[in-house]
Image (cartoon, coloured by chain):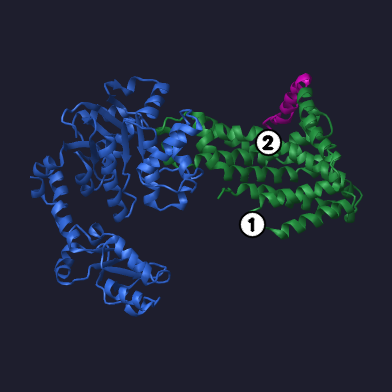
Amino acid sequence: MNNIPQLPLAHWIDNFVDWLVQFTGFFNAITNFIGSINNAFQWIFDIIPIWLFIILVLALTYYVNRDQQNWGLLIFEFLGLLMIWNLNFWRDMTQTLTLVLTSSLIALVIGIPLGILMAKSHTAEIILKPVLDFMQTMPAFVYLIPAVALFGIGMVPGIVASVIFAMPPTVRMTNMGIREVPNELIEAADSFGSTEWQKLFKVELPIAKSSLMAGVNQSMMLSLSMVVIASMIGAMGLGTKVYFAVGRNDAGNGFAAGLAIVILAIILDRLTQSLTRSRRKH
Amino acid sequence: MSTQKSTKVEVKNLTKIFGKHINKAKELSRQGKDKAEILKETGATVGVDRADFKIYDGEIFVIMGLSGSGKSTLVRMINRLIEPTEGEVLIDGENLMKIDKKELRDVRRKKMSMVFQNFGLFPNRTVLENTEYGLEIQGADKTTREKKAKEALETVGITGYNDEYPDQLSGGMQQRVGLARALANDPEILLMDEAFSALDPLNRTDMQDQLLDIQEKLHKTIIFISHDLNEALKIGDRIMIMKDAKVIQTGTPEDILTHPADEYVEEFIENVDRSKVLTAGNVMIRPTIVNIEKAGPRLALKMMKDNEVSTAYVVDSRRNLLGIVDANDVIKLVRENNGDLTPIVQTKVPTTSEDTPISDLMDDISQTGIPFAVINDKKQLMGIIVRGAVLGALAGNEVSDFE
């Protein structure tokens, strides 16, 4: 291989990132926008008293599971949140929650329309499929480098990296959900003279809802898995605690913070899963 | 059918070819090659090959053929769910192929509605919401569409299920909702694609009768797709027979039976008027059923009175046949104030399966006084066979009956 000059791939990508950096105004605007969503969530979590927050989580869980009372989950949530409070991780937990909610929200707002586009257009599917594979398989660490260059340090680059890593399931599951709507129902919608939008909102999306929600659930879990990685570039939260513990070889605190992430993950997972099950009024 | 026949739908040279090399396939088809040859040479599938026919206002026009004959493709070209490769569809003289998307939507909203083989009901909507769908997308307000939807549901005989979801209803009920949804728009044309094929024999017969009743009141133009000649003969004012993408014959049931166009049609109709192909499932009727676990003598007697019969069939909660009870015995029990039917159940009941040909049963039916019980492989009671129904069914399919 010595005779063949090495492909300057790294150089090209550097050049590309450098070229992107000149659009400072554009990226600043995005930074501010994402930052303000993030701050809004954080502001809400900061003004809610901890006891009220716990009650709200329990009430929400009770409400979304109202047709099948799940006392075990309620008790788990209650004890888990009390433990996080007791360990003094409350603020870190809300910061992590903020990061997860902001990135999931953005992943949803971009991902669902992309999924719809993918389901409707063959060309879009051909283009998006490899892009999604790329987004999901590229080691998440790699996103941090350009993210810092373009969005600085702090929560925002962490959120951007999380969005890129976490969005593919939402896109894929939206696409799949819509494509799996039985052909006869599409024909029924068409035969009554539905417009494309009516078909989408009255037939396809409602029927695809449960697979779409499964995608949202997966996206949320993936963005939660990004919190430790994001802490390396200054995203605050439970991830930071884990990251510092690694640096200090402090197994105790590392596991304590890790456990808090697990508790948060289980709560978020169960909440979004109960939304996945389609509910009916009887 | 009205005496003065005005054309409602006219189909000219309508062709659909699926796949690539469409032009070559068209060329070959003009040279008279058949579907299989064209598929072999070009890889293109001819769905419908130059269909030409007229459908008159207010008639039930049945398009008949076996699966793969192109009948479903043909009906979908009439509302352009499938874009024709060539040809014209004229509705009230207006060429459907020349109108744009918006006008096409208007035609679909106002002029024709479709009923589907597997009902095509939206699982996320209630019965009422399903029925309202066509009006909802036209932007009708809530009160109007509820009123019209309820009327349509009443027309097909479904009341009290407004808030149920489709999967809570039986197949027959679901298809009634499908029909109601199509009627709610008050369309001039109904397209029914194998609408009753997914139903069990009893429900199918009921639905056919009901469709005829509805037609008597509403006088729609109905285009009905079927693979069942008995069904076609029963409900069709005119029948069109298709085979391998081509129209073979169009005519009244009488025409078709007396002057079959070719061997294919002949073979087709030969199969109808024989008791051999009529099975127990085809001629069975609903019995008066008493569930012994729920009903006592008084209820049994009331049901027998309501249905004007002197015997009732006794089943358990799984619908397994236990026997029959006679009205006289039941009356005795009621007089004695005895609440249990068990002692008077006569367990000796002749039974048969749904797919037993009538010819095998004829002798027995004429000898026994008790109607045969038709049971499925789980021993569940499906229906009963009474002498009159057998004779009626046989007579209804006799060629001579039409002459």
- Asked if residue B120 lies in the magenta stretch, the reply is no
Q: Colour of chain A?
A: green
Range covered by the magenta-colored residues = A1-26
Q: Tell me the quarter of the image containing the N terminus of chain B.
A: top left
Question: Residue B360 at x, y = what percent?
Answer: 17, 66
Residue beneath disc 1: A68
Chain identity of mark 2: A
CA neighbours of label 1 inside 10 A, class few (<14), some (14 to 19), many (20+):
few
CA neighbours of label 2 inside 10 A, class few (<14), some (14 to 19), many (20+):
many
Residue beneath disc 2: A107
Quadrant housing residue A49: top right
Q: Secondary structure at mark 2?
A: helix
Quadrant housing residue B223: top left
Direction bottom: furthest residue: B343
Return the residue nearer the eye: A256 or B357.
B357
Magenta region, mostly helix, strand or loop? helix
Return the residue nearer the eye: A278 or B381.
B381
Q: Residue at x 72, y 57 (%)?
A: A73
Residue A207 appears in the figure: yes
B231 sits to left or right of A65: left
Q: Secondary structure at mark 1?
A: loop
